Image (cartoon, rainbow, N blue to C red):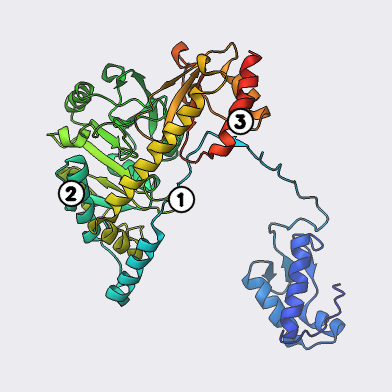
Amino acid sequence: MLTYELKKAPGVPLYESLYRCIREDILTGKLSPGEKLPSKRALAAHLEVSKVTVEGAYSQLLAEGYLRSEEKVGYFVESTHQRPAAHTPVPVREAPPKWELDLTANAPATGFPFSVWMRLQRQVMLDYGDRLLTPLPPQGYPELRSAIADHLLQFRGMQVDPENILIGAGTDFLYNLLIQLLGRDKRYAVEDPGYHKIRKIYAAGGVECVSAPLDAFGVMPEKLGSAQILHCSPSHHFPTGIVTPAARRRQLLEWAYAAPERCIIEDDYDSEFRFHAHPVPSLMSMDHAGRVIYMNTFSKTLAPSIRISYMILPPALMARFRETLGFYSCTVPSFEQYTLARFLSGGWFEKHINRMRKFYRTRRNRVIEILEQSPFADRISILEQDAGLHFLLRIDSDLTDRQLEQFCADALIRVRCLGDYYEGSVPRWAEKCLVINYSGLEEDRLTGALDRLSQILNLS
């Protein structure tokens, strides 16, 4: 028999105190699954409470699935997930290392135009009011799509119909939309080496992924085999930094035109950061048959926390989207869309990009200058430094890639080698190449870290 001594807590009904006591015993295993509880009358007499109190507690436990009732038999503890006892030790996660220098990830610079963004947000709130609470079209706010089209015309020379633009909360979401739109029966080719997350997203979406090998000019069309969809980043490939020339782009388009099911997903994620020349024309602007899907995001140019991305679908695919997936709601809040639209149309985005391009160019030049003045300058070469927010650092060393990474980690320098981004075997030319992400580097830490790296290299 249950032996609770109920005390009425201020503001808590007596039946609820009993309910909590029984539930706690079930969760901690004091009451086992299948164990029979006293009848309402017997428990009420034992606890010296009314039968109504016990009835209320049992009813709540029944409603939440902790008990089951068998007519004319009684109440039984239902099988449920038990909570570990309080004394059960909880595994302690090992704290991640505190790196002196992390060369593996880009961090946003401290140049976000907060004052402008806040002023535009206040304007949006005053001008739109209750309209901020109404749902948006599935493709996104029309004025934002028009502002994006105007930006692409001025910056990329792309003639884009705003009706073919679709706004989404990050490229991850848009990739999953594409899987549904294009079909899970298609075979996707993903650049090798490449950004592993893209392959993981496609695999999680249930599609087959194959590797798209690269040479010095980008993806090799003759190596795509039976793939029907190619995902590539011709404007600036990560991690090699390759910019695909116009001749190879035409070859990729010819590959897409050769079969009716083929298309290309053009990932243009950091084309804004090109330092010594205008961007190469996009694949979409060269496409005359509607086979290129263009993807871009504001996460790189503004901040990772601003989850606003967009894709441009060929007219036929946009018609299919409206017919088959138009029921999806837009995933970006209206407030952010209205603000970004004004940020673009008011010329603030262009000013911000110009300022950031200058900032990153200065930082890149400073990092390279420090490297070239380092004690091991005669043992390094710097590759693909004119675009994007990373470059390659090839090191003349007898260490393997794994040894190089481990020795750096021992010196609290976090690095990744180019070979880490390969799905298959790593070619000889890609060995002993570090991928240097420099946007978040702190110069005062860089010099000391390079001194330690110099000591590492002197041992090899």
Residue 389 at x, y percent in the picture: 41, 36
Mark 3: secondary structure = helix
Q: Which residue is mark 3?
A: 449
Mark 1 in CB contact with mark 3 (< 8 angstroms): no
Q: Is residue 295 visible?
A: yes
Closer to us: 396 or 328: 396
Q: Position of residue 121 (x, y in %)?
A: 35, 67
Instruction: Determine the residue located farthest toward the left in the rendered image.
Output: 288
Q: Seen in the image, is 36 located left or right of residue 305?
A: right
- Residue 110: which numbered mark, if any? 1
Check residue 319 in the rendering and tell me which mark sits there, or answer none.
Answer: 2
Q: Is residue 169 placed above or below 59 in the rendered structure?
A: above
Q: Disc 1 or 2, which lies upstream in sequence? A: 1
Picture coordinates of residue 215 (x, y %)? 34, 17
Residue shown at 27%/61% (left/top)? 342
N-terminal-most mark, 1 or 3: 1
Q: Nearer the viewer, residue 371 or 45?
A: 371
Amino acid residing under circle 2 = Ala
Residue farthest front in this picture: 373
> Where does the image place residue 50, in percent across and percent down from the top left?
78, 89
- The amino acid type of the residue labelled 3 equals Ala
